[in-house]
Image (tube, grey):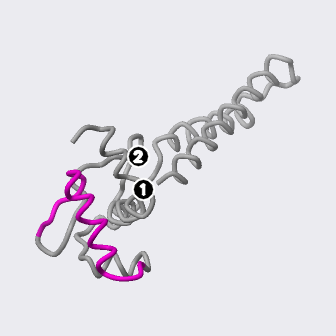
């Protein structure tokens, strides 16, 4: 199945099921998905699981279904936590801002220093915005 077709599959409730399974990190059964997402019936969960399996995004294993193919780019998964890659940039810019304000602060504030702080704050805000936007789409 092509990437466009897989993107087409990942819409609506099917996307919610995929996200739930991705975040769990453990094999899930049909009833686990139905209860976890509060779907109306197990057959609804089964329909979306079958759809994901046909697209090659999940695989049936012992104890249930697991995500076989990760479709979320620029995400880092640490155990059950999904973190946007942009958080590394936000952390870097936050650290450089602290260094600028605490360690590299000149005796007299110059326009170059103010410009450096302003650029750093702007980069930090953009990084935080992108990380939040990425996290909201997962």
Q: Secondary structure at mark 1?
A: strand
* Pick the front one: 108 or 111: 111
Left or right side of 134 for 110:
right
Q: Residue at x 29, y 82 (%)?
A: 31
Q: Residue at x 64, y 43 (%)?
A: 129
Question: Which quadrant of the view contains residue 94?
Answer: top right
Mark 1 vs 2, N-terminal side: 2
Is the residue under label 2 in contact with that under label 1 (CB below 8 Å)?
A: yes
Left or right side of 96 for 85:
left
Does residue 37 belong to the magenta stretch? no
Left or right side of 61 for 89:
right
Within 10 angstroms of label 1, few (less than 14), some, or many (20 or more) residues? Answer: some
Q: Position of residue 66 (x, y in %)?
A: 22, 63
Q: Residue at x 21, y 67 (%)?
A: 65
Q: Position of residue 128 (x, y in %)?
A: 62, 43
Q: Position of residue 52 (x, y in %)?
A: 26, 58
Left or right side of 113 for 42:
left
Which label is found at residue 75?
A: 2
Does residue 41 belong to the magenta stretch? yes
Question: Which quadrant of the view contains residue 50?
Answer: bottom left
Which label is found at residue 82?
A: 1
Which label is found at residue 7?
A: none
Q: Which residues are magenta?
A: 39-61
Question: Which quadrant of the view contains residue 34?
Answer: bottom left
């Amino acid at each position: 199945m092509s990437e466009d077709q897989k993107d087409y599959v990942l819409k609506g409730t099917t996307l919610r099921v995929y996200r739930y399974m991705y975040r769990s990190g453990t094999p899930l059964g049909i009833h686990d998905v139905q209860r976890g997402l509060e779907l109306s019936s197990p057959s609804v969960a089964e329909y979306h699981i079958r759809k994901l399996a046909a697209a090659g995004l999940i695989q049936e294993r012992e104890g249930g279904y697991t995500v076989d193919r990760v479709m979320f780019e620029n995400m880092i998964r640490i155990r059950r936590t999904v973190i946007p890659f942009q958080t590394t940039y936000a952390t870097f810019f936050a650290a450089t801002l602290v260094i600028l304000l605490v360690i590299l602060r000149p005796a007299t504030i110059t326009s170059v220093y103010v410009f450096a702080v302003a650029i750093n704050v702007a980069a930090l805000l953009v990084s935080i915005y992108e990380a939040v936007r990425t996290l909201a789409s997962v």
